Amino acid sequence: MPEAVIWTLLTVAHILAITVVLLLTIAFIIYGDRKIFAGVQARKGPNVVGPFGLLQSFADLGKFLIKELIIPAGADKAVYLLAPIISVTLALGAWAVMPIAPGWSVSNINVGILYLFAVSSLGVYGIIMGGWASNSKYPFLGALRSAAQMVSYEVSIGFVIITVILLAGSMNLNVITEKQAGGFWNWNMFGGGFPHNLPLILIMFPMGVIFFISGLAETNRPPFDLPEAESELVAGYAVEYGSTPYMLFYLAETANIVLMSGLMAVLFLGGWHAPWPEGYLASWPNWLASLHGLVFYALKTFAVFFMNAMVRSIVPRYRYDQLMRLGWKVFLPTSLVAVFVVSGWLIYTRVGA
């Protein structure tokens, strides 16, 4: 068999494996989200389908698939159906460059962060198309709100990520992860290099917090779920959707939430590295070392998602003007100043060296 064919088959198998694992993870993430929300409100949450309610997400999937697909009479049918497909394709496609374990990236490209920016920016189009094609003012208003909110917080996320790029000296997510090896004191959250970069903890720790909060706003997650605030715009851009197209929108939103949690782990919490030196991995076989990395990456991603779910459960919803003020008047100037400070620190220390 030609080498090109073997490479293609292996790549397709790799993509399918990661996609299947990601979809299963999302199913249980949704279950965990509902359980955490229920626990905060002193309820039981899903507890009927399967042991401890673990199969609730799969029951919901079956319900969505067999429900009748109703398209509003005045809707643009092609755009109406294309919008959720675009959203979910981009949400899953963003995982192509995520370094979930050593050697497990589908595409280890040197501009991984630029790829993520491009894909996340295009995600706005699915939402705008869905709101516009519904031919109703409430979905359209919800779509415009969502677009404005996502664009606003992408700016501050961009500046925060620039501080990480400066510390790592690369836009390759695998390189950024490798630079944080050796223990939690080398993670970007704590300055990105002990002891010479320790003073940067005063900058990078707030940058991690800003990235986390901006991630909530970027994914329309409570307390920033203004595009679909129940008291104002019913279900936002998805108000005219039901059945499978609505499920695809929900899948895309949840995939983006998990992506932001995983990206937080990569950029600020050391990615697949353990919080201590990993010299013992040198004597381990490659597959076992990769599995070790996958476990720690998953634990960090779930930990960030747990914080995400707790914020959703506890923090009251912002007004829209408060949301925009936070993004443009607080996060943007703060992250811009951080870029200058980190740049100045790196130049100063290298000149001094």
Image (spheres, grey):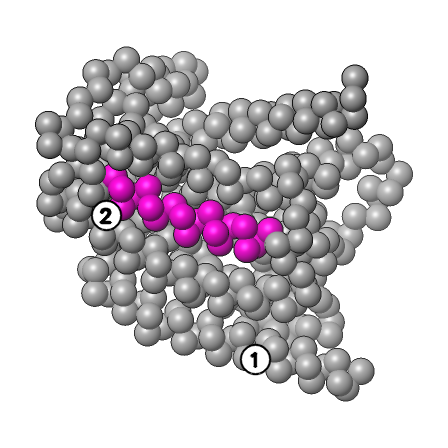
Image quarter in which the N terminus is found: top right
36, above or below 66, in the image:
below
Q: Position of residue 107 (x, y in %)?
A: 64, 41
Question: Secondary structure of the magenta portion, mostly?
Answer: helix
186, above or below 89, in the image:
below
Q: Which residue is mark 1?
A: 341
| Residue depicted at x 16% and y 33% | 75
Query: Which residue is more in the foreground, 186 or 332?
Result: 332
Q: Classify 10 Å Cα crowding around label 1: few (below 14), some (14-19), many (20 and above).
A: some
Left-right relation of 128 to 1: left
The magenta segment: 112-130
> Residue 118 magenta-drawn?
yes
| Residue depicted at x 69% and y 84% | 348
Three-letter amino acid code at the position of disc 2? Ala
Q: Classify 10 Å Cα crowding around label 2: few (below 14), some (14-19), many (20 and above).
A: many
Q: Which residue is mark 2?
A: 143
**Displayed quadrant of residue 267:** bottom right
